[in-house]
Image (spheres, grey):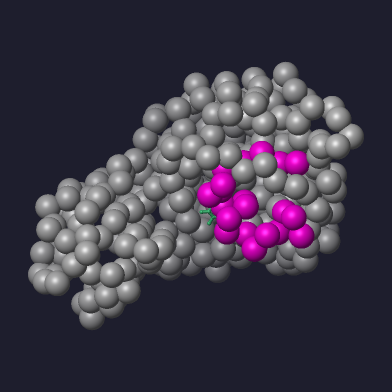
Amino acid sequence: MIDLRSDTVTRPSKAMLEAMFSAKVGDDVFQDDPTVNTLEEKAAAMLGKEAAIFCPSGTMTNQIAVNLHTRPGDEVICHRNSHVYYYEGGAMMRISGVSVCLLDGERGQIDASGIAAHINPDDVHRPATALVEVENTMNKGGGSVYAYSNLAAIAKVCKANNLRFHLDGARLFNALAETGESALQYSALFDTVSICLSKGLGAPVGSLLLGDKTLVRRARRVRKVMGGGMRQAGYLAAAGIFALENNISRLKEDHTRARYLASVLEKMPYIEQVLPVETNILIFKLGQQFTETEFLSRLKEKDIHALSLGPQSIRFVTHLDFTDSMLMKVEEALYSLKP
Ligand SMILES: *Cc1c(COP(=O)(O)O)cnc(C)c1O
């Protein structure tokens, strides 16, 4: 089976499994798990933050961040299509009782002037703006990458207005692989950063929330409340350490394969538009020859799996387990599709 639905579908490699089997573990709720502690320290050092906390999912790390940075009734500024709003089941409204100010912007990105224009005045009628959230790379924006200068400008607006700034960096390392910027320089702009180990990095489970020591200590309580305190989590953390050490430098391969697929799709008569590919996410629009359901089922007959993002819209995501020989098979399948 060729699975282009998401970069979350990867299975741990033999070497990763060996690292997991040989992990030293303890009870992480007591902070006694040496492998979890090592993972948290390692990630904090890589991103230049004081501390990190290991969580079961990126939804949890994002929602802990929202909870840390807001009080009920406060307002969060983010893009209309951001994962934290669009794909987390309404969690920030439900768990943290916040209001949202949803901005539009090309390829899922928001900018400093748009944010500045939507900070509420100190007026009892209005919710108090407390937090700005951005996503890099931007999933629903087709894996788009923020220019560093835009993020720096947003950070400046946040500082000037006493707002906190959170990065959903589920695919931060994909962004950095393209720009060549350092994780240290990047994360310095944010109060908290969330990264996922279970996406392009190929670990089976896990995300990290990074910030200063005080925030991460508070995050431990919020994680417990959310039911995310895990016990011998070192077996999972070992996969995360392996992912950080071995799977970052190869991310560009996924981007190259996504670009190649885009170049193939461009030539197909049944494709109306291929959105620009910046990282490992490829979104395209079908012409009238196929509906998205027909297209997906025709690919499925060839054991190729993808996702629809809405009417006529299809997403392919490349990843660690998508090889060159699979790429050739997908190319062949795309050429052979006849409406
Ligand atoms: C996958 C993802 C998350 C977290 O998702 P989980 O499935 O909860 O780990 C957060 N943000 C973005 C942009 C993502 O793609």
- Please state which of residues 42 and 251 is positioned toward the viewer in this rendering: 251
Q: Residue 153's spot in the image, x, y percent? A: 57, 21
Image quarter (top left, top right, bottom left or bottom right) of the N terminus: bottom left
How many numbered circles are shown?
0
Q: Is residue 131 above or below residue 234?
A: above
**Is residue 319 within the magenta segment?**
no
- Hey, which residue is sitting farthest bottom in the picture? 301
What's the residue at 53%, 49% (across, down)? 81
What segment is highlighted magenta in the picture? 75-94
Instruction: Inspect this view and state whether residue 191 appears.
Output: no
Q: Residue 92's spot in the image, x, y percent? A: 72, 54
**Is residue 80 within the magenta segment?**
yes
Is residue 2 shown left or right of residue 171? left
Q: Is residue 224 above or below residue 185?
A: below
Is residue 134 shown left or right of residue 221? left
* Quadrant location, ligand no. 1: bottom right
